[in-house]
Structure formats: structure tokens, C-alpha cells
Image (tube, rainbow, N blue to C red):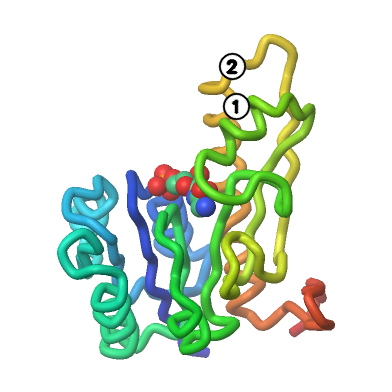
Amino acid sequence: MMPSRIALFISGRGSNMTAIAEHIRDGSLSAEIAFVAADREGAPGIETARTLGLPTVVCSYAELGRERAERALAAAVHEHLASWIVLAGFMRVLSASFVHEFAERIVNIHPSLLPAFPGSEAIRQAWDYGVKVTGVTVHLVDERVDHGPILAQAAVPIEENDTPARLEERIHCVEHDLYWRCLKDLLEGRFTKTGRRRMRREHP
Ligand code: GAR
């Protein structure tokens, strides 16, 4: 079977992108990175993508505005024949029309146990709220923020004498392990669908 082509969208340092790229390189995830896109010039992850030899696209929301930036992103997805869009720290809300164009083909990772703490600064929100357990969610993207059907979650307990920085570090470690495993299941067609529920089955 031909590996699926994925487009990775980032805004920041791109550590999730790098983790996915490493698992593709070592053969544990069968996929091809069609390109890496950023919403702004100077996203550190774009430099990393270049050093990894990956094709890159920058669609500056600041210069183009959301509508034109999204049109450029959609054109890149078609041009590079990507069948999945993988958001890896992409800090823009995609419009309903973009989401509909790629319905059930956009995946996101979020650093909390959704539906708790959607939006930005989720780790800080959970910390400030004083929860004892937080975590990571991988979900399909729908037209609402951090809301689509959940594919996978992993819990991260807050420890005695924890600090926000240490919690963040542990959450990132969990993200780097959870995302590629979940993508593997998704690309291999292992999820069944009943309403909002997505269940993983052993055999596709
Ligand atoms: C990750 O923690 C990801 O879950 C989060 O941004 C970070 C990006 O880190 N995404 C969101 O908060 C989306 N709502 P990275 O650039 O090092 O992969």
C-alpha cells in the first residue's frame, strides 16, 4: 500500500512535527510528509522542517488575512496531493468552509483532556484551575474550536511539587508519543464511527 501523504500545519517550534517526522523516518509510521506549512514567517519549526529536507510553505495570515491564507493553504494541499492535514501546534482557527472542504481529514492535537480547557494556553489554564489530572487529546477537526470527535487521549497527573514548566515538559513528551500512534491508526483505517464516537479496532 502507498503511504498516505500528510500536510503538517504549524505555528511554533514544531516539536510535534519533528516527532512525527522521526517516526516516519524510522519506519514506525507509514506516511509521507507532503509539506510543512506555517501561518507566519519566522516560525522556528519551518527552519527545522527545511533542515529535515521537507518542502515548506508559508501562508502569512498577517499579510494575507485569513481568507486568502486559507485559500493558499488549500491550494498547497491539492497541489502536493496530501490526503490528510495534521495540525501540530497550528494556532489559527480554521473557517467552516475550509473544514468542510477537508471534512474528516483534519486532525489536531491539544494539550488538555478535552472538553476541558479548549483554546490557547491550555496547560496554563489547567494549572491555574488546580486540576489533579490533565493530559493530551488527539481529535478530528470540526467547525468549532477544539471540539471535533476524539480519537485518542492520554492522562498526565499533576505531581506534588510540580511546576508549570515541568508539567509542560511532561505533556510534550506524552504528545510526541501519542500523536504518531494515533495517526498510524487513523491512516490504517482503524477507527469506526458512531455519531461522535470513534472507536479503535484491531483490524481495519
Ligand atoms: C503543543 O503542545 C500542541 O498541543 C499545542 O501547541 C503546542 C505546539 O508545540 N496546540 C494547541 O494548543 C492547539 N490548540 P510544538 O510546536 O512544539 O509542536
Left or right of 5: which side holds 189? right
Q: Nearer the viewer, residue 34 or 30?
A: 34
Q: Position of residue 80 (x, y in %)?
A: 29, 85
Q: Position of residue 9 (x, y in %)?
A: 37, 64
Instruction: Answer few, some or many: residues within 10 Å of disc 1's Cα (few below 14, many 20 plus, some between 14 and 19).
Output: many
Residue beneath label 2, please?
Answer: 163
Left or right of 153: which side holds 1? left
Describe the element under mark 1 as helix, strand or loop. Answer: helix
Q: Is residue 127 above or below residue 59?
A: above
Q: Does the Cβ of the disc 2 residue fall within 8 Å of ligand 1?
A: no
Q: At 30% across and 66% down in the image, what residue appears? A: 36
Q: Residue farthest to the top?
A: 161
Describe the element under mark 2 as helix, strand or loop. Answer: loop
Residue 90 seen in the figure: yes
Q: Nearer the viewer, residue 19 or 43?
A: 43
The answer to whether the residues at label 1 and label 2 have Cβ atoms under 8 Å apart is yes
Residue beneath label 1, please?
Answer: 167
Residue 56 seen in the figure: no
Say what amino acid the circle numbered 2 marks.
Thr
Q: At 64% across and 65% down in the image, what residue appears? A: 139
Say what amino acid the circle numbered 1 marks.
Leu
Q: CA distance from mark 1 to mark 2?
A: 6 Å
